[in-house]
Image: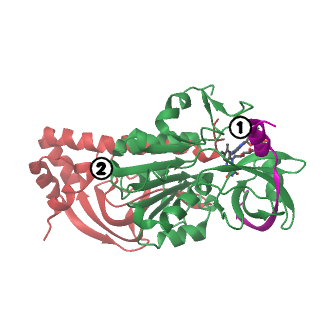
Chain colours: A red, B green
Amino acid sequence: MRTLEDLLAEVEAFEGMAPEHLRLIAGCARNVVFGDGEWLMREGDAADTFFVIRTGAVAVSTHVPQHGALLIETLHQHDLVGWSWLIPPHRVNFDVISNGTTHAIAFDGACLRGKCEQDPVLGYDLLRRFSAVLVERLQRTRLRLIDVYGHVPGR
Amino acid sequence: MCPAAEAVAGGLAPLPYRLTGKRQETADTWTLELEPARAERMAPFEPGQFAMLYAFGAGEAPISVGASDGASGRMVHTIRAVGAVTEALCATATGQEIGARGPFGAAWPLADAEGADVVVVAGGLGLPPVRPVLERVLAERERFGTLSLLYGGRSPDDLLYRDALEEWGARPDMDVEVTVDSAGADWRGRVGVVTTLIPRARFDPGRAVAMVVGPEVMMRFTVAALRERGVPAERIHVSLERSMKCAVGVCGHCMLGPEFVCKDGPVFPYTRVERWLGVPAL
Ligand SMILES: Cc1cc2nc3c(=O)[nH]c(=O)nc-3n(C[C@H](O)[C@H](O)[C@H](O)COP(=O)(O)OP(=O)(O)OC[C@H]3O[C@@H](n4cnc5c(N)ncnc54)[C@H](O)[C@@H]3O)c2cc1C
Ligand code: FES
């Protein structure tokens, strides 16, 4: 049977991670399953967990008063979900809801924060990996701000 | 008349085509089916070539060919009403005639793509010009490697050819990924820019040929994502749009640096136009 470490090694964000670090973070992880419409995270909650999607998809959304839920983006296989566990004040900023059945690996962020404090090399490595994900998400957001399909071709 | 002048004159005279069918795709976009109104008809089109469609009294616009049938002369175009000409074309009633001339321009490099993984990335109204590529690869499936269509739109309401997308998505020999930039909570598909589809699409970058069409900003970022995935720049092709008049390389309206988009393009290897696309005034 494949261990959590094996599964994590396949995730791009953890590619090339030292085996001892993989073992450490796998120690804070467990397999979880969400049914359609189930919440992974709720805006305003304490951010003590993040996820890696194994299969399925989740919707990141926010609630607009008198309008309902506004869908911001969807995340899919091997995407990381949630970074607020790493950055104070450790509060969830958006709702995350399962689209269909989602299998994921849930990480205890509080446990990982403790390990990062004790082991700065692990802390730096994780921060570097999460920064890459954050930059990629920022780029996507910028692209959406451009509203490419509203543009006139060739101009 | 000398042969060159004859060729130009031939390319400049529109032929009458009759509208035989019309379907509304989105709030401002229509798919029109045309057939020759008389015996004379345009020569068969290669995937990626375009026609100049003439709405009598309004003017002419370059429009890609979504499908064409050499035997019957039937043509399918998808047109977004953005100004005088395209509005008049979209307002044409079934049975009415418009003018058409073509085929014009360079086609997608399908011969070079034989044996390769074919990656088609389309954004917005970019789906019609690559539809003939998809149909050709599906018709001659064994000649090509994997086939991926990565399609991005502004919102679910802006997606074109929904029936075809569903049909292609159900095929085992083709991968279809669709994403939109924004959507309401009832949308069950992907939300995110089209470039997010590239890192995990199923193709081997070392043996892929990519064909990209959509707004120019979208193409720039898409090409960057394809290169990051490892697709060699010289195997990435883009289809460009510029304002056109003659469509036969005479008037100079469509020039991009030294290139005539109407004659040398609209399909170009990216490496050939890359430096000109970076010049703000062009
Ligand atoms: C090779 C080629 C293939 C093309 N294929 C298609 C096609 O398959 N379907 C299609 O609908 N169009 C296509 N176009 C674009 C089409 O030719 C133009 O939209 C058309 O010429 C606009 O003419 P108009 O008189 O309707 O609008 P104009 O009066 O010229 O423009 C009206 C307004 O729309 C803006 N505009 C112009 N072009 C576009 C555009 N493409 N998108 C958004 N806004 C625009 C102008 O800046 C202006 O503000 C293609 C262009 C080229 C060069
Ligand atoms: S449109 Fe006249 S030269 Fe290209």
Q: Which residue is mark 1?
A: B243
Q: How many marks?
A: 2
The three-letter code of the residue at mark 1 reads Ser
Residue A83 position in % (x across, y down): 33, 49
Q: Residue at x 82, y 54 (%)?
A: B15
Assess disc 1: are there few (<14), some (14-19) or many (≥20) residues with their C-alpha within 10 Å of its C-alpha. some
Res B20 → quadrant: bottom right
Residue A70 position in % (x across, y down): 54, 58
Q: Is residue A111 left or right of residue A56?
A: left
* Front label number (2 vs 1): 1
In this view, the residue in front, B88 or A78, is B88
In this view, the residue in front, B190 or A108, is B190
Q: Secondary structure at mark 2?
A: loop
Q: Secondary structure at mark 1?
A: loop
Q: Which region shows up in magenta?
A: B1-28
Vertical side of B167 occupied by B129: above or below = above
Residue extending farthest right? B57
Q: Chain of mark 1?
A: B
